[in-house]
């Protein structure tokens, strides 16, 4: 297997931050490169962030606030995306529907020799604090941080109230973690900061290592890509590929118009479906 194919294989497994490729200036924790983020989102033709992550327009995010899991499910199934919904969350600060552009992070059980490289590269890059704080620096307004912590609960608490405040101040949005959180009393004081976690626990995060930022991750039965749109509702979370976000918004609006008694042809035309 040549070197390029080896890199592709490493990216596919999620082990993409152990800097097997060093940039001329410094190693990068998010080794899944800008070119790869573009390559692996080939159906998105719109605006992108500087790192290649798809950037669905703010106006579309606002329109998706009314989309339900059922509505998104139908559109995704029709488009051939059959593994985009994950339920079974404990929701902290429920309220307005959670909608945002996904920033991904993946943790794995700690292995000292690998983690020593990760920490050394983080030091070179000027990253400060513990590894669970590094990902917060990447957030933009409207982002939802989505973390694969392999379902770890005890010693699998990605944040407490301090890091929760930092996330919300950067993104003005929420957090989804396949793991746990702590300091729920404090997090409940962060108005508007919705968190979907598997569980809560008083322990601190231990014995894990951060192995990727803005790389493909697994959340339950879903493969989540950076730039997907997370839509949370009482049933769970739907992860929408960016190229389907506006279609789902259009169809949601069309159904609302039909329910209000608008003639079918007019509802289709005004919702952009026709």
Image: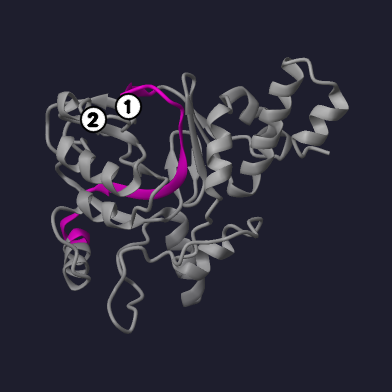
Q: Is residue 92 magenta?
A: yes
| Location of residue 191 by image quarter | top left
Residue 153: which numbered mark, if any? 2
Q: Give the x, y percent position of residue 21.
A: 36, 75
Question: Where 117 falls versus 170 (above or below)?
Answer: below
Q: Nearer the viewer, residue 167 or 210?
A: 167
**What residue is pinned by disc 1?**
198
At horizontal 33% and vertical 38% (from top left) the residue drawn is 150
**Mark 2, secondary structure of its residue:** loop
Q: Give the x, y percent position of residue 182.
A: 17, 30
Task: Answer few, some or many: residues within 10 Å of disc 1's Cα (few below 14, many 20 plus, some between 14 and 19).
Answer: some
- Check whether the beta carbons of the residues at disc 1 and disc 2 lie within 8 A of each other: yes
Quadrant in which the C terminus appears = top right
Q: Is residue 269 visible?
A: yes
At horizontal 17% and vertical 63% (from top left) the residue drawn is 119
Decide if residue 255 is on the left or right side of residue 16: right
Question: Where 41 falls versus 19 (above or below)?
Answer: above
Q: Give the x, y percent position of residue 52.
A: 49, 64
Q: Is residue 93 magenta?
A: yes
Task: Answer few, some or many: residues within 10 Å of disc 2's Cα (few below 14, many 20 plus, some between 14 and 19).
Answer: many
Magenta region, residue range:
89-115
**Mark 1, secondary structure of its residue:** strand
Q: Give the x, y percent position of residue 199.
A: 27, 24
Q: Nearer the viewer, residue 254 or 200?
A: 254
Marked residue nearer the N-terminal end (1 or 2)? 2
Name the image colouring: one colour
Q: Is residue 1 visible?
A: no
Q: CA distance from mark 1 to mark 2?
A: 8 Å
| Location of residue 195 by image quarter | top left
């Amino acid at each position: 297997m040549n070197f390029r194919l080896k890199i592709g294989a490493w990216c596919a497994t999620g082990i993409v931050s152990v800097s097997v490729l060093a940039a001329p200036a410094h190693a990068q924790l998010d080794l899944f490169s800008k070119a790869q983020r573009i390559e692996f989102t080939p159906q998105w033709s719109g605006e992108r962030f500087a790192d290649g992550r798809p950037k669905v327009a703010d106006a579309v995010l606002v329109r998706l606030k009314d989309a339900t899991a059922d509505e998104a499910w139908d559109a995704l199934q029709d488009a051939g995306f059959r593994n985009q919904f994950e339920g079974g969350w404990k929701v902290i600060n429920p309220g307005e529907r959670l909608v945002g552009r996904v920033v991904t992070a993946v943790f794995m059980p700690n292995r000292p020799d690998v983690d020593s490289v990760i920490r050394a590269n983080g030091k070179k890059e000027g990253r400060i604090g513990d590894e669970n704080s590094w990902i917060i620096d990447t957030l933009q307004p409207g982002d939802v941080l989505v973390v694969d912590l392999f379902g770890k609960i005890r010693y699998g608490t990605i944040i407490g109230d301090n890091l929760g405040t930092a996330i919300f101040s950067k993104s003005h949005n929420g957090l989804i973690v396949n793991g746990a959180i702590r300091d729920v009393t404090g997090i409940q004081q962060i108005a508007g900061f919705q968190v979907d976690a598997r569980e809560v626990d008083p322990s601190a995060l231990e014995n894990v290592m951060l192995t990727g930022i803005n790389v493909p991750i697994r959340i339950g039965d879903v493969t989540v890509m950076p730039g997907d749109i997370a839509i949370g509702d009482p049933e769970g979370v739907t992860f929408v590929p960016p190229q389907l976000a506006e279609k789902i918004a259009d169809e949601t609006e069309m159904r609302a118009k039909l329910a209000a008694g608008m003639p079918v042809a007019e509802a289709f035309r005004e919702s952009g479906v026709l």
